Amino acid sequence: MRRRLAVIAGDGIGPDVVAEALKTLAAVEDVFHVGLDVERLPHGADHYLKTGVTIAPADMQRLGADFDAILLGALGDPRVPGNEHARDILLGMRFQLDLYVNERPARLIHERLTPLKGKTPRDLDLVVFRENTEGLYVSVGGTFKQGTPDEIAIAEELNTRKGVERIIRHAFAWAKEHGKTRVTMADKANAIQAHHLWRRVFEEVGREYPGIQRDTRYIDAMAMDLVRTPESFQVIVTGNLFGDILSDLASMLVGGLGLAPSANRHPGGVTMYEPVHGSAPPLAGKNVANPMAAILTLAMMLADLGAADAGRAVEDAVDAAIGQGVGTADVGGTMGTREVGDWVATRVREARAR
Ligand code: NAD
Ligand code: IPM
Ligand code: MN
């Protein structure tokens, strides 16, 4: 059975890294015959500046209905200072397709990649589950008396019982399924009254998982402990904004954004895959961006689509590259974006022989 993949390369380094993910996918198809039909969609800053349309409602609807998976590069362009196209397309997918789970793993491939002295791959293997449809991202609020000394800007943080419960439940279920023994929640219940909802739900849902230890931290201490004792974290669950921040921090502990993949999920529905990093405009088109985050994102997608062996082959190829010092400058290598993609694709093709 053939499946359909929508690809939105997007802005900045998005097209650079997506090209290498698709190069890797071509190698995967040769070896593992996954059977994915790729359709490229034009959405991004160029398309918006040309047409005045960020994304039409019918296109958003199609993304939810017509595809088995979506691969996104990145969105964000200095020519769109208000970032409205990214809000409509990226946050649009998360909200309108109700992709409430943002899964962001951080795994240390090689000890030379971590800035933390003395830490090894055994100490750094965690996943952040970021609530992806609520929190401070909902655009509830507005501005009043804009441009005057009395200007007011309000952004409300939205937390629903349903929204909090489903992400926490997902984190515990994932932990159980993957043999993990602890789930940590980060919140700010000591200052933000509404976060007691998170604490209560965490207790209630956690009690349904007696084999899994419940651990809670305030977000400030969490940021500190991630650096101090990363080995104490296996599964982290948190709200939308805290998850955004913690996932960049976690990525830096294992080699940086150039290695950080993610999946935006609604279990049972379409999943949108994207590297955690943004469009890094200064690097765009220069053959310097690290494509490994996009390639590892592809590996997550392949595993989900039932091609576990293909996903593993892609991940193994990236691990092998890092192990041999192959990579872009951000991971200590000397190669360009395309050369890293070539290396990984060749390695995947060789997986047939192994
Ligand atoms: P960024 O992730 O683009 O860059 C942060 C830093 O990491 C920069 O120093 C950049 O050079 C480096 N970096 C990121 N990806 C890299 C890669 N693959 N290889 C090597 N180095 C890499 O974040 P930013 O600079 O804050 O934002 C730039 C634009 O991207 C903004 O418009 C922002 O809104 C947008 N953005 C989009 C997404 C997304 O589409 N999912 C995510 C984050 C930021
Ligand atoms: C991310 C990005 C986005 C977010 C921005 C571009 C809106 O930083 O995917 O991590 O904050 O979710
Ligand atoms: Mn982010």
Image (cartoon, grey):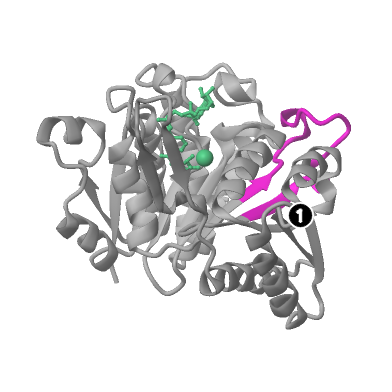
Residue 59 picture quarter: bottom left
Give the mark count: 1
What is the x, y in percent for residue 331? 62, 25
Give the residue at mark 1: 190
Residue that protrudes farthest toward the front in the picture = 150
Left or right? Give the position of 211 relative to 278: right
What is the x, y in percent for residue 321? 60, 33
Please name the amino acid that badge 1 sits on. Asn
- Residue at image position (66%, 29%) is 324
Left or right? Give the position of 252 relative to 7: right
**In magenta segment, residue 215:** no
Residue 15 visible within the image: yes
Left or right? Give the position of 41 relative to 19: left
Is ligand 2 within 8 Å of the beta carbon of the residue shown at mark 1? no
Q: Which quadrant of the rendered structure holds the N terminus?
A: bottom left
Residue 351 visible within the image: no
- Residue at image position (57%, 26%) is 327
What is the x, y in percent for residue 112? 76, 28
Location of residue 204 with respect to 140 vertically, above or below: below
**In magenta segment, residue 112:** yes
Residue that protrudes farthest toward the bottom in the picture = 208
What is the x, y in percent for residue 204? 72, 79
